[in-house]
């Protein structure tokens, strides 16, 4: 199992950025994939997830309306489109596969970092929003 996050960088406030998560060794028809972030000194925060079984998605309130998660099954890549970036969005961004192939993990009660921690994680990509 391997998840490779990429696409981070230094951008100005108000800019957009698209992150990519290349996935191998995970059945994307069954498992969910999520995006998380962690700023220095803070806990890892869940952002958005997408279900492999039905392509439904779930967003945390903190990014709803600004971030969009999508999947290209043929490329085995999950994207996170981030718009209207703010300095508070500065963090290392991670993608992860759910621990089990259950829709619960990508739902309002299941999409929490503590539930995903035993899943498979990528190495993270740094996003810095600064003028």
Image (cartoon, rainbow, N blue to C red):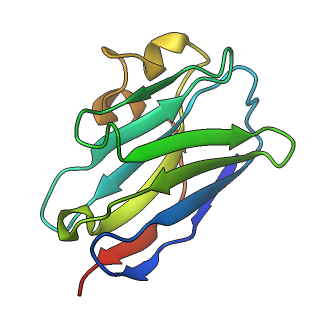
Residue 55 left/right relative to 131: right
The residue at the far right in this view is 74
Q: Residue placed at 33% from the left, 54% from the top?
A: 37
The residue at the far left in this view is 41
Q: Is residue 107 above or below residue 112?
A: above
Q: Residue placed at 26% from the left, 49% from the top?
A: 44
The quarter holding residue 131 reads bottom left
**How many numbered circles does the render carry?**
0
The quarter holding residue 50 reads top right
Q: Residue placed at 46% from the left, 21% from the top?
A: 106
Q: Residue placed at 29% from the left, 66% from the top?
A: 91
Residue 46: x %, y % from top left: 32, 40
Work out whether residue 19 can be spotted. yes
Residue 128 left/right relative to 80: left
Name the one closer to the observer, 12 or 91: 12
Name the one closer to the observer, 11 or 84: 84
Residue 36: x %, y % from top left: 38, 48
The residue at the far bottom in this view is 131
The quarter holding residue 35 reads top left
Residue 52: x %, y % from top left: 67, 24
Work out whether residue 118 can be spotted. no
Residue 41: x %, y % from top left: 12, 64
Name the one closer to the observer, 67 or 32: 67
Q: Is residue 39 above or below residue 29?
A: below
């Amino acid at each position: 199992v391997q998840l490779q996050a990429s696409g981070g960088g230094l951008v100005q406030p108000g800019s957009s950025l698209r992150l990519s998560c290349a996935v191998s060794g995970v059945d994307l028809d069954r498992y969910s994939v999520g995006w998380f972030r962690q700023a220095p000194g803070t806990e890892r925060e869940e952002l958005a997830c997408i279900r492999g079984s039905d392509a439904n998605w779930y967003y945390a309130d903190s990014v709803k309306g600004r971030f969009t998660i999508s999947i290209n099954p043929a490329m085995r890549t999950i994207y996170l489109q981030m718009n209207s970036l703010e300095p508070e969005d500065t963090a290392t961004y991670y993608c992860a596969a759910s621990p089990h192939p259950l829709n619960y993990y990508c739902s309002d009660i299941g999409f929490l970092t503590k539930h995903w921690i035993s899943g498979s994680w990528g190495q993270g990509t740094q996003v810095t929003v600064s003028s």
